[in-house]
Structures are given as C-alpha cells and as structure tokens.
C-alpha cells in the first residue's frame, strides 16, 4: 500500500519559491515598532476632530494626517495577513494578524468623524480652502467624491443611529454565512467504484467536473437535499438582507437599492440594464453551447449537473511552474516592454509564493499595500488552469504596481469595477497566444473549451445572478413577500431562460438561489460580467495593434482612483455606458464556439 503524500512544512520549502516579506519589515521586531508608532499617530490625528472649520491649513493637516495613518496601517495589515496566510497554523502570525485587524478597526472608528465633519462645511468655505492652500488641489477629486454624498448624508444624530445599527443590519448576511459554511452537514455519497466521499462545498465543485456521471448526480442531489431542508430559513435570511438594502437606500434618499449601491463608484444604472439586455439578446449563443455539450457527452437528457464536466476528456496539456513562467512571459509580450519589465521583476524579486505547504491558505490572490510589492499567492499544480491563474493574478499585481508608482497614495488603489478588467485581459491574451501556438487539435479544443466555460461562468452566469438580484430587490420594494416558494419558482424560470431547451430541469436547480453568497453582496456580482467583457474588448484592440490601444491600456493601469471608473475606461477605449463592448465580447464567444465545433468535427466527435 502506498503512503499518503504529505504536504511539506513551511520551513522545508526552497526559498526561491516563497515570497520575500523582508522588503516590508526586516523582522517582526520592526513590525512591532511600526505598530506602536501607528497607535500614537491615531491618537494625534484624532485630535483634529472639531477643527476642520478653522482654516485651510488645519484642514490640510487633518486630511494628510488621516491618509498617512491609513497608509501605515495598510502596510501593517498586509504584512500580518501574508504571514498568516503562508501558514495559518502558526500561532505567532495568527496573533500578529489579529493585532493588525484590531488596530485597523480601532483606527477606523477613531477617524470616522472626518467625512461627516467635512460635509458640515459649505461649498463656499471648501472653495475658499482650495484658494488658500494650493496643495489641496491634489485632493480635489478625493474631496469631491465625499461632497457628492451630501444629498444622501443624514444629520449627525441620524448618521450615528445608522452606524450603531451596522451590526444589526449585517445580521442576516452573517447568519447565512454561519449556516452555510459552518452548520450545514452534507451527506456522504458513493461513487461508481463504491468509494465513500464526504460532500462539502469544495468537494462539490470538484465533483461537478467529474467524468463519472453517477458521481455528479449523487453530489448534486445530495447537496440540494440539504438546502431543501433549510429553504425557509435561507429565504428568511435573503429576504431580510434585501429589506436592509432597500431600507438603507430609502432613508438616504436614493431611488432604489441599486442606485445606492452603484453611487459609490458613480456607475450609471444604465450600465447594469445594458448588460442584462445584451446578454438576454445573446442567450441563443449559450443555448447553442449547451446543446453542443449535450451532443458531445452523448446524453439523452442533459441535466444541470452535467454543465461543468470537460467536453474533451482528460487534460491533454500541462505545465510545470518553470514552464508556466516561460509561457506567461512569452504570452504577455503584446503588452510591451514596460509591462514585461514589471512581470520580470515579479518573477526575479520573489513577489510570488508558489507551492502548497502545510497550513497554507487555499486558492490564489494578488495582495499588497501602497508601500509594498504586489505579492501573489498560489498553490501550484501542473495544469492549464494554473497557468491561467498565474497570468490572472499577474494582471492584478501589475495593475497595482503601475497604480502605486504613478499615483499619490490618495489615488493609489482602484475599484472592484476596474480590478477584474486587468486580470481577465491577461487571460484573453493568453488564450489567443495558446490558440496561435498550439497546433494539436485536441489541445486547441481543450483551450477553447476552457475559454467558453469561463465565458459561460463569468458573463452568462453572473448576469443571471445580477438579473435575479435586481428582481428580488424590486419585488420586495413593491411589497411582495420573498418566500421560499416564490424565490424558487422565479429562479427556476430564470435558469430555464438562460440555459434553454436542451436541458432537462430538475427541481433541485430551483433552489440554487439559497446557496449563492453573492446575493448578500449588495449589487456586486454584475461587475464580473462587465469586467470580463471590457477585458475582451481591450485585448482585441491590443492584439490587433490598433493605434494608441496599448498606450491607452497602460494609462488605465496607471490611473488608480484618480477619476471615476467609467471615465477611466472611456480613456482606455471602452465606453461601458454603451452596449458595443458587450456585443464585441459576444462575437468573440461566437467565433470561438464556431472553431470548437469545427475542431470537434475534425476529431470525429
């Protein structure tokens, strides 16, 4: 009997495959000193409360003092969370992370007075401050963003009441999270070889990709059997969460919860409606892809549990990390020398924590602060998907690098609306590179399948979620009770509209609404679809070497939050208030679907 393979301890990893956090703090003693310095700075800056009316000099000192504190806090937080994530079983770094998180919360509370006090100043007084202190010009956009909230800011006493109720307002979401992640007990299922598998959220995702249909069906039915038992509880948590969004929007004088949610980034509601409209017009493309899936899998009935298994069988291509690094560098060549220099630095300066070790946080991400490298966490396996993950996270990290090296701290970050565009542009460029360089029809079919599934999951599926999310907010605002039966009935109809007639629908899929955490995120999920679509348009321009396309793209990466996201993207060459970029993405999907069908015919499938 072979021994079970054990993950290595952190200390056993080769140094070159780990990130170098000594560039943040040389040791934990330096962290401790910085921690104490920030505690002192928070108290000093809190002393400016009540002084913003005293003149431009005092106003500027208070503003810059607060920003300086947050800049130092972010560095402390990033160091502690990276140290914790590299080995979550290390109690020393658990403690470090807890201390940094606690200090961040304390500072946020101590400095929360600034925006409400700013809004007590008249427009004339603020205009005079800009005249008196020319240095304030750098902060004009930052201050204007706060002033834009004036119509939706309540008197101080009412603001205090809302702030004090924040924990209560979050109770429904927290209850869902605890029930969904901690309390639900999923059954043990049996595969075709008689092996027993304990079902969990993570295992479910893996089993949906299994080539064994009996396993997929057993996992699907086992999972939803549990959600069926708690459907009324989940309906109550979701309904209460929706009511919270609608209530807060109403008391802040917004027309709707969606208007309130999108106002922070100045995103017109038409962007949301245009996304839903364009995706709905193009649903026949998804129906065609679903029908192809049914044919290739040789099924008389295609069920929702058949939607994620690969169409071309086992992966015909894989990469070691070293091979993936070479591929990534080569694939990203169209982004130019300036971009390539940052990619080279990422690989040579140990920004990346590559391999899995005992206790390491799962998954992958890009992280960092204004004064640190934009670090990447991976858990490497030799797969095509991991190559895509590498270039995806590299897109985030290069975006962060350019932003922080071209903007002052106050604009040294970017909104979620912009974030996924940089990462998925890299994915699109990698897809095109692989299709240009791989000649084996089976490999090309596998790459196309990967792209089409990603498009399906990111544009079609996330827009389906967005459409349902807006529907339930509107229904609640109209006084319609969001019961489990009502939610299930309408979700089932929407799912059938999206996936079409090739699917045989089971009752289980009607309950999918009950397990989607994004429905608690307050109009967040649509940004996955808009971001992927914008990335498709940008990568097409770059690869076609359109005049100014690359320069405009790099300027977007350098813009940070110096302008509103819609304006940043217009300068990059994509007007997200219009449907064109979405229609262009659909054309790419259609062309790659055509190619996959042709390749499969060539392969005799």
Image (cartoon, helix red, strand yellow):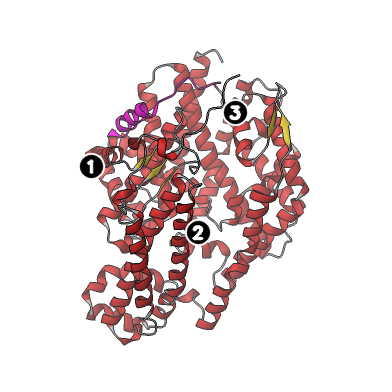
- Which sits in the foreground, 150 or 189? 189
Highlighted magenta segment, given as a residue range: 312-333
Residue 320 belongs to the span the image colors magenta: yes
Quickly name the residue at label 3.
309
State the SS at label 1.
helix
Disc nearest the viewer among 2 and 1: 1
* Image-based side of 419 in relation to 512, left or right: left
State the SS at label 3.
loop
Cα separation, mark 3 vs mark 2, equals: 36 Å
* Image-based side of 311 in relation to 497, left or right: left
Q: Position of residue 91 (x, y in %)?
A: 49, 52
Quickly name the residue at label 2.
269
| Marks 3 & 2, CB-CB < 8 Å contact | no
- Work out whether residue 508 can be spotted: yes
The residue at the point 54 percent across, 37 percent down is 456
Quickly name the residue at label 1.
338
Q: Quadrant of residue 264?
A: bottom left
Which of pointers 3 and 2 lies earlier in the amino acid sequence?
2
């Amino acid at each position: 009997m072979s021994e079970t393979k054990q993950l290595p301890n952190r200390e056993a990893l080769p140094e070159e495959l780990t990130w170098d956090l000594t560039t943040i703090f040389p040791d934990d003693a330096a962290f401790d000193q910085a921690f104490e310095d920030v505690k002192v700075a928070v108290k000093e800056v809190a002393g400016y409360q009540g002084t913003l009316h005293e003149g431009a000099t005092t106003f500027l000192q208070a503003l810059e003092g607060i920003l300086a504190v947050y800049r130092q806090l972010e560095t402390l937080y990033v160091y502690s969370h990276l140290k914790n994530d590299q080995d979550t079983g290390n109690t020393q770094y658990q403690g470090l992370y807890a201390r940094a998180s606690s200090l961040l919360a304390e500072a946020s509370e101590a400095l929360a007075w600034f925006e409400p006090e700013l809004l007590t100043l008249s427009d004339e007084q603020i205009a005079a401050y800009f005249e008196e202190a020319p240095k304030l010009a750098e902060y004009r956009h930052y201050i204007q963003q706060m002033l834009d909230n004036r119509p939706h800011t309540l008197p101080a006493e009412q603001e205090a009441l809302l702030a004090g109720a924040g924990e209560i307002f979050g109770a429904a979401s927290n209850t869902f999270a605890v029930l969904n992640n901690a309390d639900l007990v999923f059954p043990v299922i049996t595969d075709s070889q008689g092996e027993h598998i304990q079902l969990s959220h993570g295992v479910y995702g893996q089993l949906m990709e299994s080539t064994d249909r009996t396993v997929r069906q057993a996992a699907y039915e086992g999972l939803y059997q549990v959600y069926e038992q708690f459907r009324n509880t989940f309906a109550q948590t979701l309904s209460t969460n929706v009511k919270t969004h609608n209530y807060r929007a109403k008391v802040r004088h917004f027309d709707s919860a969606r208007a309130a949610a999108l106002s922070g980034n100045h995103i017109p509601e038409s962007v949301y409606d245009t996304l839903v409209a364009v995706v709905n017009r193009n649903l026949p493309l998804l129906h065609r892809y679903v029908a192809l899936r049914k044919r290739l899998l040789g099924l008389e009935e295609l069920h929702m549990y058949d939607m994620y298994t690969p169409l071309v069988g086992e992966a015909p291509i894989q990469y070691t990390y070293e091979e993936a690094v070479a591929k990534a560098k080569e694939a990203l060549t169209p982004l130019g020398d300036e971009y390539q220099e940052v990619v080279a630095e990422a690989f040579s300066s140990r920004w990346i924590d590559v391999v899995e070790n005992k206790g390491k946080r799962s998954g992958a991400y890009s992280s960092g602060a204004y004064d640190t490298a934009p670090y990447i966490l991976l858990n490497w396996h030799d797969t095509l998907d991991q190559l895509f993950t590498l270039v995806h996270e590299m897109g985030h990290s290069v975006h962060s690098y350019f932003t922080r090296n071209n903007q002052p701290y106050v604009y040294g970050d970017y909104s979620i609306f912009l974030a996924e565009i940089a990462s998925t542009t890299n994915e699109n460029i990698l897809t095109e590179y692989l299709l240009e360089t791989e000649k084996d029809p089976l490999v090309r079919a596998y790459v196309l399948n990967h792209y089409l599934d990603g498009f399906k999951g990111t544009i079609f599926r996330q827009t389906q979620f967005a459409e349902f999310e807006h529907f339930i907010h509107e229904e609640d605002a109209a006084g319609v009770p969001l019961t489990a039966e009502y939610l299930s009935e309408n979700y089932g109809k929407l799912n059938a509209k999206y996936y079409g007639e090739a699917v045989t629908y089971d009752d289980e899929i009607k309950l999918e609404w009950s397990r989607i955490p994004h429905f608690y995120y307050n109009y967040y999920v649509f940004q996955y679809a808009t971001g992927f679509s914008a990335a498709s348009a940008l990568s097409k321009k770059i690869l076609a070497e359109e005049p100014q396309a690359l320069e405009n793209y790099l300027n977007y990466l350098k813009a940070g939050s110096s302008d509103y996201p819609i304006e940043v993207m217009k300068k990059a060459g994509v007007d997200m208030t219009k449907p064109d970029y979405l229609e262009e993405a659909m054309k790419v999907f259609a062309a790659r679907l055509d190619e996959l069908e042709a390749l499969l015919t060539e392969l005799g499938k």
